[in-house]
Amino acid sequence: MTSRPTVRRLTLVPLVVLALWLPLLPVTAQAADAPSSGSTFSATPPGARSAVVRDLRRALRAADANRRIPAGTEPGRVDLVGDTRTLSPACTADPGETRHRICARGRTGSDHTVVVLGNSKMAMWLAGLEYHARREGVRLVPFIKYGCAPYMFEMWRKGSPWPECSNWRDWALRKIKRMKPDLVVTAAHTWLEFEGPNGGQMPKGRAWDRTWQTGVERTARRLGRSADRVVVLGDALTRRDNPGDCARRPGPTMRLCEVTMVGRTRQLLRLTERGATSGGAEFLDMNAFTCIEDRCPIVAGGSYVFRDKWGHLTATYSRQISRAFATSIGLRR
């Protein structure tokens, strides 16, 4: 695990540097009223000279030149929806379930534990993270319920309240507290609905935005009492169509299938970042791995980036950028 003296964003507190390097147990820099998740390592996006950014820039230059999607792009089939890394059904909470088996990955007997908490927007990163967990000698523990955001608010789904999600989240938070992990990484999609104070569906607007930000903050703060570090991931953008549909059109070009990040996506990222940092966590915008200057190519580095219009990555691309992601969160040294 990486441990380097980088001060977490917006944290202005003294740092105590230890001569003894401890993997996955970085020195903490703790304010009097903050949870214990502060650390000398800060989650950072890939740098300008990284392979991820280089591949994205090449893809956008190809789009500007109106080039076609390259032959041999992986996965070879254009039916991208199936290019996913799924866990065993026993290891995730399916509809009607509020708990699941604890299925550790990586180096399962390790004393160092990284927890990933969320829904499909967290699960899509497992395709790449498992390898790096094994390489670094880390126990990787997923807590996944599809469709359920792990943040502390009441969800509304299919025309009614969804307490099943809150029950699973509370169970997962209790389990994580007992584990006392070195790192928790959490993520969720933002296209969801909340139960309002009067028992109905909360309309979109300022109250919705406050509910989202406060839910992220409360969860970050609670996780910070259980883990040495907490990283909240910003949701990847959604597309107007499935990328596979665009790629199957006659003569598909990189420009035709490119998407642009809209203002609402940027606003939701700001709300997530405010909630995370207010709760004492670190924030990492995952669009840094898929977009440059609000432009998001369909292909980068020889791989399709997204598998559907909801912003889920292909397992192929998740593995391709896994080294950069693992380095960004401090899982890889």
Image (cartoon, rainbow, N blue to C red):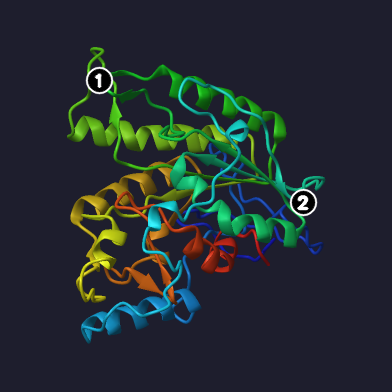
Image coordinates of residue 186 in percent, x first then y, are: 51, 43
Whether 283 is drawn above or below 154: the answer is below
Is residue 195 in view from this perspective?
yes
Q: Secondary structure at mark 2?
A: loop
Q: Residue at x 62, y 58 (%)?
A: 40
Q: Nearer the viewer, residue 51 or 197?
A: 51
Query: In this figure, which residue is indicated by the disc labeled 1?
Result: 159
Indicate the quadrant where residue 78 lies: bottom left
- Tell me: residue 220, above or below residue 125: above
Q: Secondary structure at mark 1?
A: loop
| Residue 32, numbered label | none
Q: In the image, is 278 to the left or to the right of 104?
A: left
Considering only vertical position in the picture, is 75 above or below 22?
below
Please state the horizontal and vertical placement of residue 128, each as a whole percent of the image.
58, 59
Marks 2 and 1, the one that precedes in the sequence: 2
The residue to which callout 2 is attached is 107
Say which residue appears at 28% left-offset and 55% top-offset.
Answer: 242
Distance from disc 2 to disc 1, alpha carbons, whole Å, reads 42 Å
